[in-house]
Amino acid sequence: MRTHHITLLAAAGLLALTGCSEAVTSKPKPDAKVGAPTSAPQSSTAPEALSSAAAAAGIPPSPAPEQRTIYLAALNKIDPEIVNGKDDKAISRGLSQCQSMKDQKDPTKRVESTNRRFISPNHPDGFGPTKAAFILAAVQTNLCPTY
C-alpha cells in the first residue's frame, strides 16, 4: 500500500475516533431527551479534514480532469510505457512522488526517487536518469508545482 494511502487511512481513523470519543466518555445530561440529536452531523467537515491531513502529509489533491489529461500526455510523450495504459497508476505514482519530494530539495535525489518509483514490465529498474528527470518535470509541473 502506498504511503499516501496509509496517511489518509490514519487520518480517517483519527477522525472516526475523535468523533466517537464524546459519545463513549460523555454521560447524558439529566434533562436531555433520550434519542434526541445533540448536535448537527459533522460529515461536511470530514472531507475537508481529510484534504487538510493529506495536504499536511505532502499529498497534493488529485488533478482536475484537464490537468490529468495534460499530465498523462506529457508522460506518454516521454515514453508510452510509463503510463502503459494504466492512467490511475501513473497518477498515483505522481502524487506519491510529490509527497516524497515535499521535503527533499536535492535534485539528484529527486531524480533517483522518480527512477525507482516509475517502472514498467520492460523497465523494472526504472527508465534511467534522463527519462526520470523528464518524468519528474512532468510530475512537478502538473501535479505539485509548489514543491
Image: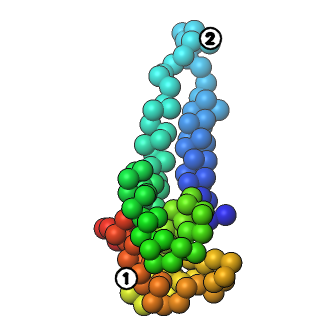
* Residue 55 shows in the view: no
Q: How busy is the neighbourhood of tag 2: few (under 14 within 10 Å), some, or many (20 plus)?
A: few
Residue 120 is situated, as x and y percent measured from the top left of the image, at 63, 77
As drawn, 32 above or below 11: above
Q: From the viewer's side, name the closer residue of 23 and 101.
A: 101
* Residue 34 numbered mark, or none: 2
Residue occupying the point 58% across, 75% down: 81
Residue in the image at 57% along x and 9% along y: 33
Badge 1, how many Cα within 10 Å: few under 14, some, many 20+? few
Instruction: Residue 93: name its quadrant.
Output: bottom right
Compared with 71, 130 (above or below) is below
Q: Residue at x 57, y 47 (%)?
A: 12
Residue 17 lies left or right of residue 61; in this view the side is right
State whether residue 11 appears in this view. yes
Towards the viewer: 13 or 21: 13
Residue situated furthest left in the rendering: 146
Q: Quadrant of residue 48?
A: top left
Q: Nearer the viewer, residue 48 or 118?
A: 118
Helix, strand or loop status at disc 1: loop
In the rendering, at what x and y percent does residue 74 appear?
41, 70
Q: Position of residue 136 (x, y in %)?
A: 42, 78
Q: From the top left corner, tell me how far across and down residue 147 is, in percent.
A: 34, 71
**Observer-nearest residue: 42 or 64?**
64
**Residue depicted at 50% across the width and 25% down the height:** 41
- Alpha carbons under labels 1 and 2: distance apart: 56 Å
Q: Are marks 1 and 2 in contact (CB under 8 Å)?
A: no
Q: Amino acid at mark 1?
A: Lys
Which residue, given by chain and number where applicable, does mark 1 sit on? 105
